[in-house]
Image (cartoon, rainbow, N blue to C red):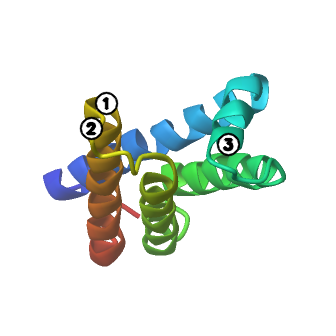
Amino acid sequence: MTMILVVATVGRAMAAGLFVIAGIAKMVGPAPFLAHMDQFSVPRVFLPAVIALEIGAGAALLIGWRPSITAGVLSVFCIVTAVVFHRQLGNRAERTQFFKDLALAGALAALAAAGVGA
């Protein structure tokens, strides 16, 4: 295994872990996530879909199953999350979350384009 492939695989696993852990957290303790969704008028019915996306796509990315497609889907999810939940750019914490989500979306888009580490 070349160094580029090792680094790409480890990086992909690190990104995947973020989503898997987030999905599990939502599944185990949904109350604060539902309250946050309520705050932004996001229908509660979306929570199971978000959990499935985070755990399913995160696991797929972790094992390297169709990493370009999976990373692309997660990239779009990060952009949607930033726009829906972190658009109060006058608030420093929200601005940080907004740009963190966009940065993660960019990294995932680069992974989708490169398709390495599969």
Tell me if mark 2 has few (under 14), some (14-19) or many (20+) residues whose alpha carbon lies within 10 angstroms of its own. Answer: few
Any mark on residue 93, and which? Answer: 1
Q: Secondary structure at mark 3?
A: helix
N-term-proximal mark, 3 vs 1: 3
42 versus 23 height, above or below: below
Q: Is residue 62 left or right of residue 33?
A: left
Any mark on residue 96, and which? Answer: 2
Between 88 and 26, the one lying in front of the other is 88
Residue at image location 78% in from the left, 53% down from the top = 43
Amino acid at dot 2: Thr
Tell me if mark 1 has few (under 14), some (14-19) or many (20+) residues whose alpha carbon lies within 10 angstroms of its own. Answer: few
The quadrant of the image that shows the N terminus is bottom left
81 versus 112 height, above or below: above
Indicate the position of residue 16 as horizontal and vertical percent values. 47, 46
Any mark on residue 82, and which? Answer: none
The CA distance from mark 2 to mark 1 is 5 Å
Q: Secondary structure at mark 2?
A: helix
Residue at image location 64% in from the left, 39% down from the top = 39
Point out the residue furthest to the right here.
Answer: 45
Q: Secondary structure at mark 1?
A: helix
Amino acid at dot 3: Met
The residue pinned by badge 3 equals 37
Between 31 and 114, the one lying in front of the other is 31
Between 59 and 9, the one lying in front of the other is 59
Tell me if mark 3 has few (under 14), some (14-19) or many (20+) residues whose alpha carbon lies within 10 angstroms of its own. Answer: some
